[in-house]
Image (tube, rainbow, N blue to C red):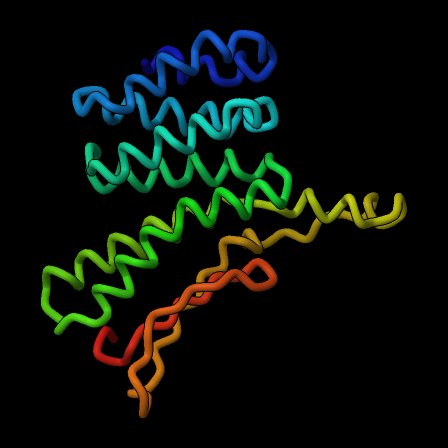
Amino acid sequence: MFTIGALSEWLADHPVMINSVLPLVLHALGNPELSVSSVSTLKKICRECKYDLPPYAANIVAVSQDVLMKQIHKTSQCMWLMQALGFLLSALQVEEILKNLHSLISPYIQQLEKLAEEIPNPSNKLAIVHILGLLSNLFTTLDISHHEDDHEGPELRKLPVPQGPNPVGDIVFAIPPPPPVGMSLSLFNSVGNVVIVLPAPWG
């Protein structure tokens, strides 16, 4: 499996081979014994070959969601998997990105809302930190800046791209004072930012 990952740049130059290699990697994701090698390989393929992966995106997302929900992998591999999905989604059209984000994020937002209503304790606090880590890793690699070129003229496209953090990767955590009415956790994507609001006890 590591050999396939090492050939990810070669696959980018020979995309016709992706159809033969990808099923092996996705199948390996369900094997805990191949956790490190399969997840790292998928991440490399999604990073190097992302513009050739849109035809396979639905399958990759579905398999990844399945293994994440089944908690097959350890925390670090789950973070890598979310990074892989961020690379993958970056190559899709905006409508497809939003559709897949809704599918990926909704279960975690529901879990966060439920956890935020519970009495704080070490167990559910760790669960919240884990979920926020997953979301953070997803948005760290999700880059939609190239879509802006579709709305820019030739002159603007020639301008150098400012160096800095990935605009979609800016995660802002706001912990407000106790509200007069029960506050539910909310997450939204606005101008490339994800803002997560938690009730005060979770600070």
Q: Residue at x 49, y 59 (%)?
A: 170
Residue 90, position as x, y percentages in the image: 56, 39
Q: Quadrant of the N terminus?
A: top left
Q: Answer with the quarter of the image where residue 191 lies.
A: bottom right
Horizontal side of residue 131 vs 10, given as left or right? left
Q: Is residue 148 left or right of residue 98?
A: right
Closer to us: 82 or 58:
58
- Residue 53 placement (x, y as % from top left): 55, 24
Quadrant of the frame with the C terminus:
bottom left
Number of on-image labels = 0
The residue nearer to you, when weighing 195 against 62, is: 62
Name the residue: 53% across, 13% down.
11
Q: Residue at x 24, y 69 (%)?
A: 116
Q: Is residue 199 left or right of residue 94?
A: left
Residue at point 32% right, 79% down?
183
Which is more toward the observer, 59 or 82? 59
In percent of width and height, residue 103 lies at: 42, 45
Is 44 placed above or below 117 here? above
Point out residue 65 in the picture as x, y percentages from the top left corner: 34, 36
- Residue 61, located in which quarter of the rendered image? top left
Question: In the displayed structure, would residue 14 be above or below residue 54?
Answer: above
> On the rendered structure, is 102 left or right of 29?
right
